[in-house]
Amino acid sequence: MKAKQLWEQYKQRLCITSSLGLMLDTSRMNIEDGFLSRMEPEIQKAFAAMDALEAGGIANPDENRMVGHYWLRAPKRAPSAQIGREIEETHRAIKDFAFSVHAGKIVPRKHIIFSRILIIGIGGSALGPQFIASALGTSADRMKLSFLDNTDPDGLDRVLAEIGKDLKHTLTIVISKSGGTAETRNSMLEAAAAYKKAGLPFERHAVAITEVGSKLYEMAKKNGWVAIFPMWDWVGGRTSVMSAVGLLPAALQGIDIDALLEGAAQCDEATRTKDVGLNPAALLALAWHHATSGKGAKDMVILPYKDRLMLFAKYLQQLVMESLGKEKDRDGTVVNQGLTVYGNKGTTDQHAYVQQLREGVNNFFATFIEVLHDRTGSSLEVEPGVTCGDYLNACLQGTRNALYENNRESITITIDRLDARSIGALIALYERAVGFYAQLVNVNAYHQPGVEAGKKMAGAIIKLQHDALSLLRTSPGRSFTIEEMATAINAEEQVESLFKILEHANMNDDHRVKRLPGKTLFDARYQSSGH
């Protein structure tokens, strides 16, 4: 396409949302004439489904639940006055709590002020707070954040060692909707043990974010934790960042949570319009549908040209892939839907995998995220009349042009500046785009049966480990091959898992398992090494 034609296409396809300081450009997507008009009936159905969802309909039929993350930033739109009041009361409680912590009114002990936060969670309970903290944190933050978001012992040790003597100044926030997530429980127990070792009462440092009546709620209430904040069954983990899950850490960090909520609410309002050409979330969903043939045929590469957005791709991985990656559609038909997301940041990616994006397998579409405002204050000229920010802008445009030149498709999202309001808007934009796209491909975006399946299988592995180690402990002096042990504990169908369990146990002192060499690794014998 000639430059003049491309310019005309750019002007025609640029969606400008002035209220958000946001522009969405789909001119570099090879969307054929007639695509939007052909998809108009389907996107109108998606609008109607979104209206029903926001009105309190059962949008997650598999779990018979409403889906209400949009109410979190617009409580008056909640389907009942009670839900609206609970949201507003939680907002007030978060602000009051953060003020009291900062003012030294909530303290673990006399003369000790909380200056750090340790957040314990996994998935959406960690990714959202991590993204906001990274995107909006400054050297002037009121409190420093650390995260325990995995059950890796070495990872736990690294974080707790970094906190070190500051543990006495650290407020720990444990986030678990059900209160039964094993990884979060493990990290909580490890943190509690660290407090105990330091001679500190964990309960004087602990806050829970959970559903009323959950295991975590009852524990926190019984042991007199500092505070408990609510989660609701109508908010999923991957869309919980505008609940206490994201707002409490942000408020404690010193981020303007009112601006965060305002940006999300304004984006929600802008994306309620039924005029597709003026609705950036609808256009985004339709561009995804075009690029992937509505079947996940291509990957989504997120390229934000701003260091503060480095974690955005990681955040979007869960939001998009957990929402859209489904074996069956709403009618029970096997469809194996999904949309793969990866990315890091520009210009780093230009020196990494952009080589393949431009010249390798054409199995993706890119999304560039451009932030027009470079920094507070003026910039140094690195060449006459050229700043680092100018180079960053040139790199974005250059990569975008280089991809287009080789028939690689891309979307560009431009925001005026990066602040709490624009971060709220970006999160809301993708949440609604995911909702629209899910409707277009007829999948339930609000359940995650695959995640639950993995948890159940992990539980089965733990039971197998218990059986195997119990056999060794009750058979002193006796050794077993893998096959002998599998037969002894009726686990012939799980022999490979048993092998991995025992190899892991052999490499760690916790369970006192010893491997006796055999002719090959598979002829080795295992026995208890004592207590």
Image: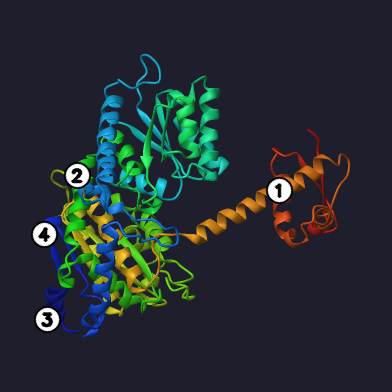
- Percent across and percent down for residue 484 are 84, 55
Marks 3 and 4: which is nearer the front? Answer: 4
Residue 193 visible? The answer is yes
In which quarter of the view is residue 508 placed?
top right
| Three-letter amino acid code of the residue under disc 3 | Lys
Cβ–Cβ below 8 Å for labels 1 and 2?
no
Mark 3 residue element: helix
Which of the two residues, 413 or 405, is positioned nearer the viewer here?
Answer: 413
Q: Residue at x 37, y 58 (%)?
A: 319
Which three-letter amino acid code belongs to the residue tagged 1? Answer: Gln
Of all residues shown, which one is farthest toward the top? Answer: 110
Asked if residue 527 lies left or right of residue 26, the reply is right
Of the residues under marks 2 and 3, which one precedes in the sequence?
Answer: 3
Mark-to-mark CA distance, 4 and 1: 58 Å
Callout 4: 10 Å neighbours few (<14), some, many (20+)?
A: few
Q: Which residue is mark 4?
A: 18
Q: Is residue 305 visible?
A: no
SS of the residue at dot 4?
A: helix
Name the secondary structure under disc 2: helix
Q: Amino acid at mark 2?
A: Ala
Residue neighbourhood size for the residue with mark 1, other residues' Cα within 10 Å, grouped as few (<14), some (14–19), many (≥20)? some
Q: Which residue is mark 2?
A: 259
- Indicate the colouring scheme: rainbow
Q: Nearer the viewer, residue 35 or 436?
A: 436
Q: Pointer 3: what residue?
A: 4
Q: CA distance from mark 3 to mark 4?
A: 25 Å
Q: CA distance from mark 1 to mark 2?
A: 49 Å
> Looking at the image, do the residues carrying marks 1 and 3 touch, with CB atoms under 8 Å apart?
no
Quarter of the image with the C terminus is top right
* SS for callout 1: helix
